Amino acid sequence: MAHSLGKYADFEGLRERAVALRRAGLSRRQIRDRLHVDNNDLLNRLLQGEPAPEWTKRPNAKDDLRARARELRLQGWTYDQIQVELACSKSSISLWVRDLPKPERRDPSEQAKLASRKRWEHELAIRDEERQRTKAGAAAEIGAMTARELFTAGVALYWAEGSKDKTYARRENVLFVNSDPGVIRVYLAWLDLLGVERERLAYRVMIHITGDVEGAKRYWADLVGVDVGTFQKTTIKKHNPKTVRKNVGDNYRGCLVIRVSQGAELYRRIEGWWNGMVDAVTGIIPPLSSGKV
């Protein structure tokens, strides 16, 4: 040892001094200068097992990438998969995760399935971005609505979603049911345009038996701006065991039923307005200036 270390023959004594300086908060450069150790390998041996002081640990822009790479490696990802996911070099990944256990080798079919799933997820993300861009562009085309536009939109909306009178059952009631909060907002704006006082409106929730009744009532009450205590008795829909329901989960709030009291005259006018719209549709309507739909 004495021959190989040369001027550093007293290794143990040198290590004690190096460790003491390290624990006192000195950096590697400061310890090297203090002890006149010019050999990096020897300095590494002297400081082996001694953590660097916090002040020497400078923030690294790649710290987040490193943490994510280690997380993925622990999940069994290969270097190639991590490289594609994080868009960084394999050499960096190797440095970050080399102390972690290697993932178990997957059979080729499983690797192919994983690669296919990653490609499909990427494709779905692109499609969703295009979908949202199209929707945003279409929304911008609407702009501000005139009273006339809201009037005709409301008539069509009611005739599509509202209750209608039948020759075999005279029920000239203005009753509207829907689960879409946007549709409810447009419908209420239309009633306001018609001069229907909010005091004439009665609300109740129609919801499946497994739904959160109280949560749904609070949600709809907040949307329409009334006290939940004013809601009428909830209509509970029973479960059909032969039906697989998809409207489940935390976002399921059933439907809101809105009834206009003393609405017979209003109903007759709605039906008349709708018939007038049907009669007015004649000839070929030119397409929108934005092009084909």
Image (tube, rainbow, N blue to C red):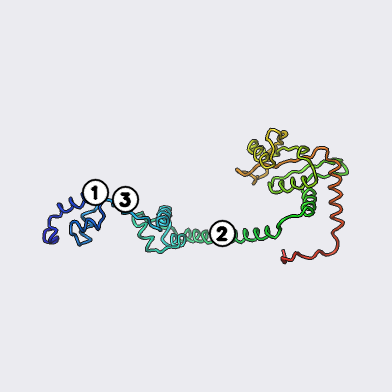
Instruction: Give the CA separation, mark 1 to mark 2.
Output: 52 Å
> How busy is the neighbourhood of tag 3: few (under 14 within 10 Å), some, or many (20 plus)?
few
Please give the name of the residue rendered at 14% of the width and 60% of the height, measured from the top-left corner: 5
For label 2, the residue is: 125
Dot 2: what SS? Answer: helix
Callout 3: helix, strand or loop?
helix
Residue type at tag 1:
Ala
Q: Residues within 10 Å of mark 1 (few under 14, many from 20)?
A: few
Q: Residue at x 21, y 51 (%)?
A: 21
Disc 1 is placed on an element classified as: loop
Instruction: Tell me the number on the disc at residue 24.
Output: 1
Left-right relation of 283 to 252: right
Q: What residue do we see at 67% from left, 59% from top?
A: 140
Quarter of the figure with residue 258: top right
* Location of residue 89 with respect to 184 vertically, above or below: below
Residue type of the residue flagged with mark 2: Ala
User: Left of 100 or right of it: where is 172?
Assistant: right
Q: Is residue 263 above or below residue 292?
A: above
